[in-house]
Image (cartoon, rainbow, N blue to C red):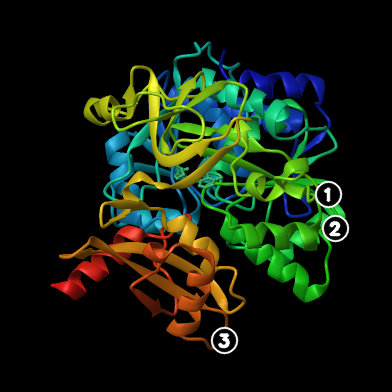
Amino acid sequence: MNIAHWLERSAQQFAATPALFHGDHCVADYAGFASRAAALACALTRQGIGPGDRVAIFMKNTPDYLIVLFGIWYAGAVAVPINAKLHGKEAAWIIDDSGARLAFVTPDCGTALADASDVARMDVSSSGYAAMIQGAGLPPLSRGPDDMAWLFYTSGTTGRPKGVQITHGMLATVSLCYPVDVDSVAQTDAAFYAAPMSHGAGLYAPVHIRMGARHICPTSDGFDPAQVLEVASHQGPLSMFLAPTMVRRLVDAAKQIGADGAGIKTIVYGGGPMYRADIEDAVQVLGPRFVQIYGQGECPMAISALSRHEVADRSHSRWRERLVSVGRAQSAVEIAIGDADGHPLPAGQMGEIMVRGAPVMPGYWRNPEATAKTIRDGWLMTGDMGQLDAEGYLTLQDRSKDVIISGGTNIYPREIEDVLLTHPMVHECAVVGRPSAEWGEDIVAFIVLQKDARTDEKEMDALILSELARFKRPKQYRFVPDLPKNNYGKVLKTDLRRMLTKDTE
Ligand code: AMP
């Protein structure tokens, strides 16, 4: 089944229901949304773009994003969404790797791309695009569950991104898991696109389309927490996906203006570690509106989930352990913890998280070597270290490559970061290993303090020693103005390690 059938069906069922919004402005109802996508498909077909052909989307979040995405699917082609924050050269590399024949762009992204690639561009603010989305349309072309729908380039914290092949079947499964494992969806809801649609936020569009919900793109350029609160207050109930750093910013903004999150139905958070102090604070300020998911490009959004109740519960005897977990397996996957050879380990043991099931990718795009390393005996090797408890809660420690081995002992930076973050002066931190002749690796903590805050190594050390074993004590605390991050806000520990290696040379 082509996932675009969901839009076709919603256009029949909810024809006059408002569908696409730019801020407060309604751009299209469901009938208009579907007819534009269908017309775009017709225009693509006239250009010779058809089943399996790749079409890039290098656009900021706008309502046209969804028209383009579904138009590509109506035509049976494959969308290649590219994060709008990428440099033109990075986008050009993805376009080249994917073999995309055309790129839909917003004007700013188009300018960035023009210098780096000679791929044909279609600016969604142009008259050419306006003509493309008018007139006769095509019904969605028939597609099988194994046909590719979305070529998703993993953000990666090292090396070049890899293209994850997301099929129509995977998209349907991930979408159907949402109401089972994450949150209910009602026609009265609105999906709010605060995070890049090229990533998780966009993957949640199909289920909201099928339910006839509204889709709202913010008018702000980038993430504006004050606008989220404002839109929620008069356009709610809003559901949105946010990365942990965005949750923090939203909570800070709410505190500043004394907002309580009214109008926000659900914030799904994930994509990176959420520290316990932050999520406790978030629930305190905004209420029980949070659900956590754990996924990765290779099994998008669908590995595990921690429910709204579990995120907000403070009465269960083990609520703290649950809150720092990423919840339990979502319905379409099996999770196991593997040893170095990928053999499943018993409950409670630490190892690499392995996942199997319908939402797992068939492989990377034109990269059989990387696929063979990542999918072993049908299991997706996530590269994340963690453990499962007897009740099925999964707790992540670190990416396997981030584990520090000092004196032959594995040390999980997350544990140390969790303790440092309980200090009121600490805003952010990242703990990494530094090569050491004596120990193999030493522990170094990079710390960003709150604005105007003051503290010193001694105080940090006392805190660590009050909570953790001595061998987990950082050898050095480095106070820095900020941490290097990629375009999705993930800390680039590789850069920090590189910095330390340079220092020791
Ligand atoms: P990406 O493929 O770019 O979405 O990155 C996926 C990676 O982000 C995972 O392999 C994890 O390391 C991390 N991640 C995703 N969700 C969570 C979560 N809820 N908690 C901690 N880390 C997460």
Q: Residues within 10 Å of mark 1 (few under 14, many from 20)?
A: many
| Residue 31: numbered disc | none
Mark 3 or 2, nearer chain start: 2
Mark 3 or 1, nearer chain start: 1
| Residue 236: numbered disc | 1
Q: Quadrant of residue 379?
A: top left
Coordinates of residue 201 in the picture (x, y in percent): 60, 43
- Residue 423 appears left or right of 497: right
Q: Can residue 95 be seen in this view?
A: yes
Q: Nearer the viewer, mark 3 or mark 1?
A: 3
User: Could you give the CA–CA distance between mark 3 and mark 2, rounded to whole angstroms?
Assistant: 33 Å
Q: Can residue 133 be seen in this view?
A: no
| Residue 233: numbered disc | 2
Coordinates of residue 408 in the picture (x, y in percent): 26, 52
Q: Is mark 2 on a helix, strand or loop?
A: helix
Q: Which residue appears at 30% of the width and 33% of the height?
A: 340
Label 1 beta carbon within 8 A of ligand 1: no
